[in-house]
Image (cartoon, rainbow, N blue to C red):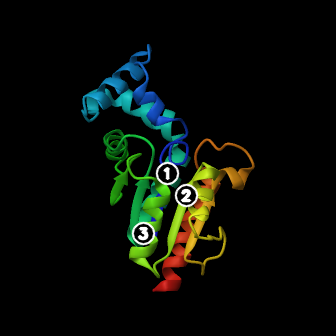
């Protein structure tokens, strides 16, 4: 199974790319985090308050962090996990390292998401592709290029989990309930294919 995940406002609860690209915040933790990302420096024990600020601000409370970690680890154990984002690859990889989340690769704006998904579907057929994104247009673009995914059909090759469509509003990242459903979906799909 391939799990393709958007990053900003899907895995994160705030827009990471905007934070990194904008001027440094004026608060101490925000400024230290901004500098660490721009200098590609890992946070250390000495910067524990900055690390706590980072994970809470961008990945939510401890319950959401656990649910996110469980989902990504389950997807990783069940196949290939790819991040497809319009953000910067280095900044995303920095954030993933700080969270100790393993993924197989990160694609940025230089590879359009629909092109990446088409290539995965061609290269991996009949492997299952789960695509999770908060922007409904990203899903429609893929469908417009000849693929017809079905969100809730576990036997369908391409499954989209559209946060906007699930909640009827602009999502602020996967909720704990979303993450639990996705973890269960990946687990059930992996067991069915085994």
Q: Where is mark 2, residue-wise?
A: 132
The image quadrant of residue 19 is top left
Q: Which residue is drawn at 66% across and 70% down?
A: 152
Q: How many residues crowd around disc 3 within 10 Å: few (fewer than 14), some, or many (20 or more)?
A: some
Asked if the residues shown at circle 1 and circle 2 are in contact, with their CB atoms under 8 angstroms apart, the answer is yes
Q: Residue farthest to the front?
A: 145
- State which tag comes first along the sequence, 2 or 3: 3
- State which tag comes first along the sequence, 1 or 3: 1
Helix, strand or loop at disc 2?
strand
Could you tell me how far apart the alpha carbons at marks 2 and 3 are, in whole angstroms? 14 Å
Asked if the residues shown at circle 1 and circle 3 are in contact, with their CB atoms under 8 angstroms apart, the answer is no
Q: Where is mark 3, residue-wise?
A: 120
In the rendered structure, the answer to whether residue 169 lies left or right of residue 143 reads: right
Q: Give the image location of residue 160, x and y in percent.
A: 60, 64
The correct choice, above or below, for 82 with respect to 184 in the image is: above
Could you tell me how far apart the alpha carbons at marks 1 and 3 are, in whole angstroms? 15 Å
Which residue occupies the foreground of this view, 143 or 49?
143
Q: Give the image location of residue 168, x and y in percent.
A: 75, 49
């Amino acid at each position: 199974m391939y799990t393709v995940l958007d990053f900003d406002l899907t895995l994160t609860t705030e827009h990471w790319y905007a934070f990194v690209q904008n001027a440094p915040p004026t608060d101490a933790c925000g400024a230290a985090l901004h500098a660490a990302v721009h200098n590609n420096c890992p946070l250390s024990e000495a910067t524990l308050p900055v690390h706590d600020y980072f994970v809470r601000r961008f990945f939510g409370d401890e319950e959401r962090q656990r649910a996110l970690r469980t989902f990504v680890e389950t997807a990783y154990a069940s196949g290939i996990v790819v991040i497809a984002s319009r953000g910067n690859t280095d900044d995303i990889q920095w954030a993933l390292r700080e969270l100790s989340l393993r993924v197989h690769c990160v694609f940025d704006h230089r590879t359009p998401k629909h092109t990446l998904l088409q290539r995965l579907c061609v290269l991996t057929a009949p492997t299952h592709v789960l695509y999770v994104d908060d922007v409904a247009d990203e899903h429609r673009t893929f469908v417009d290029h000849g693929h017809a995914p079905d969100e809730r059909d576990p036997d369908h090759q391409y499954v989209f989990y559209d946060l906007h469509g699930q909640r009827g509003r602009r999502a602020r990242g996967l909720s704990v309930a979303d993450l639990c459903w996705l973890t269960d979906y990946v687990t059930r799909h992996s067991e069915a294919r085994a």
